[in-house]
Image: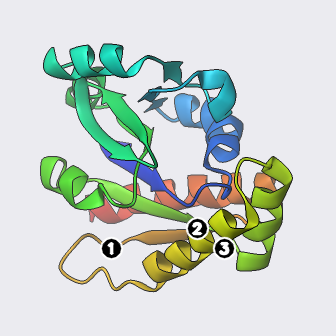
Amino acid sequence: MDGRLIYLMGPSGSGKDSLIEAAREPLLAAGCEVARRVITRSAESVGEDAVGVTPAEFQRLREEGSFALYWSANGLDYGIPARIDQWLEDGRSVLVNGSRAHLPIASERYPELLPILLTVETGVLRKRLLRRGRETREEIEARLRRNELFVAHDSSGGPVIHRLDNSGDLDITVIRLLDLLSSSVKQDRI
């Protein structure tokens, strides 16, 4: 892999954090760093390897230029540390847990980024969200409707979004992710 930003997106409950953790070692072995997000809530409540900060700390970090990318969603602030720029400059690829709504801004800043949308069958996603217990049934159904609209959205004019299904076995999704990254590198060299 040659210094490319891999921008993983997907709805809450799609398994982004599980996929990132399961793929971490093979990604590192392939020369791909995995960036830790900074989030305005504790990492324990997120379920991902993130840095939890207060809103005031987040604002200070943003003003200091500590983030390469940042956005707000669902009442929280998210930041991708600026050190990813050094990794990319050094020729290392970097995987980030990104935001679907922030993709146009990320694509503008990193024109060579590889956007990957982690998808999950609606029934499977509903079960995962219910099991997690963070939202009411109404909030879950609203989230599922927003997800279906995004997945159906045509990305013409923007980067081609690669879809990766995570409705089944996580080990298979990891293999598919690594295959996608490998084939993407081969296409770039042609």
Instruction: Describe residue 65's horizontal placement relative to residue 33 as left or right.
Output: left
Depicted 116 relative to depicted 28: above or below: below
Determine which residue is flagged by label 2: 143
Q: Name which residue type carries label 1.
A: Val
Q: Closer to us: mark 1 or mark 3?
A: 3
Q: Name which residue type carries label 3.
A: Glu
173 or 105: nearer the viewer? 105
Quadrant in the picture for the C terminus: bottom left
Any mark on residue 141, and which?
Answer: 3
Tell me how far mark 2 sits from mark 1, CA to CA: 23 Å
Q: Closer to us: mark 2 or mark 1?
A: 2
Element at badge 3? helix
Element at badge 1? loop
Quadrant in the picture for the N terminus: top left
Inspect this view and state whether residue 167 appears: no
Q: Residue at x 80, y 49 (%)?
A: 133
Q: Residue at x 24, y 84 (%)?
A: 156
Instruction: Describe residue 159's horizontal placement relative to residue 48 as left or right.
Output: left
Q: Residue at x 40, y 52 (%)?
A: 99
Q: Residues within 10 Å of mark 2 (few under 14, many from 20)?
A: some
Confirm or deny contact between disc 3 and disc 2 (CB under 8 A). yes
Inspect this view and state whether residue 89 appears: yes
Q: Name which residue type carries label 2.
A: Arg
Where in the figure is residue 80, as x and y percent of width and height? 34, 31
Determine which residue is flagged by label 1: 160
Q: Residues within 10 Å of mark 3 (few under 14, many from 20)?
A: some
Instruction: Describe residue 90's horizontal placement relative to residue 12 as left or right.
Output: left
